[in-house]
Amino acid sequence: MSSSPDSPKSILERYCELDAEGKQLSADGWDEMASFFASPSPPDLKLIIVTKDFVVSDALIQGNRAKLYVEYVYLGEIYPRLGYTDPHIADSPVTIRGPIKVRIQYMLARSGQGSTWRIDGSHFAPHITLDSAIRYVTWLMNKTTDATVKRNAERTIVALARQR
């Protein structure tokens, strides 16, 4: 059964598609992404999640609120100085190497009958594809004059390319 274009699931799928393309990483892209939020604020780029894929669950709708989950294949994290790490689980007694599946809950709300569903609550770190990550890190590497950031970026690009 396919969702209608204005259903919570369709809205969240479109948000995830744009996020995967890296739209949260630029001012112009963020202007487009802000329309998905009930209370938009600029994204926090302290952490960027690199993913391989995502799947959006069906919505559990109760009145003007909808709860959905997005499952991602989580490949790693990019930090502000363009360092990259493999995924990890906080406080885990076991070291995890390689991709892991992560599930994030999203709440959507609408303000009245017939209004558009919007993501309610705080923003999430960008979840971008490998290709988007390589483009973003390359772009930042070419802009910076900081030798450490350039070195980190080169290592990050190599690590990302290996995961293709």
Image: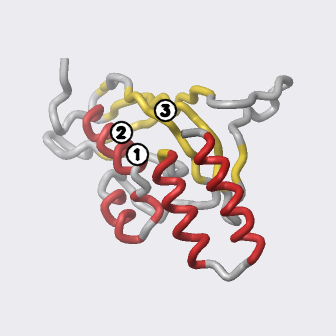
- Residue drawn where x is 31% and y is 25% of the image: 62
Q: CA distance from mark 2 to mark 1?
A: 5 Å
Quadrant including the C terminus:
top right
Q: Is 125 or 94 nearer to us in this picture?
A: 94
Specify the label residue 105 is tagged with.
3
Q: Is 65 or 139 nearer to us in this picture?
A: 139
Q: Secondary structure at mark 3?
A: strand
Crowding around mark 3 (Cα neighbors within 10 Å: few <14, some 14 to 19, many 20+) is few
- Residue drawn where x is 33% and y is 25% of the image: 59
Q: Secondary structure at mark 2?
A: strand
Crowding around mark 1 (Cα neighbors within 10 Å: few <14, some 14 to 19, many 20+) is some
Q: Earlier in the sequence, mark 2 or mark 1?
A: 2
**What residue did someone put label 2 on?**
108
Q: Secondary structure at mark 1?
A: strand
In the picture, measured across the screen, residue 64 lies left or right of residue 147, that is: left
**What residue did someone put label 1 on?**
120
Q: Are marks 2 and 1 in contact (CB under 8 Å)?
A: yes
Quadrant including the N terminus:
top left
Please state the total of marks drawn on the protein image. Answer: 3
Q: Are marks 3 and 2 in contact (CB under 8 Å)?
A: no
Can you tell which quarter of the image residue 138 is in?
bottom right
The percent coordinates of residue 9 (x first, y second) are 29, 32
Can you tell which quarter of the image residue 98 is in?
top right
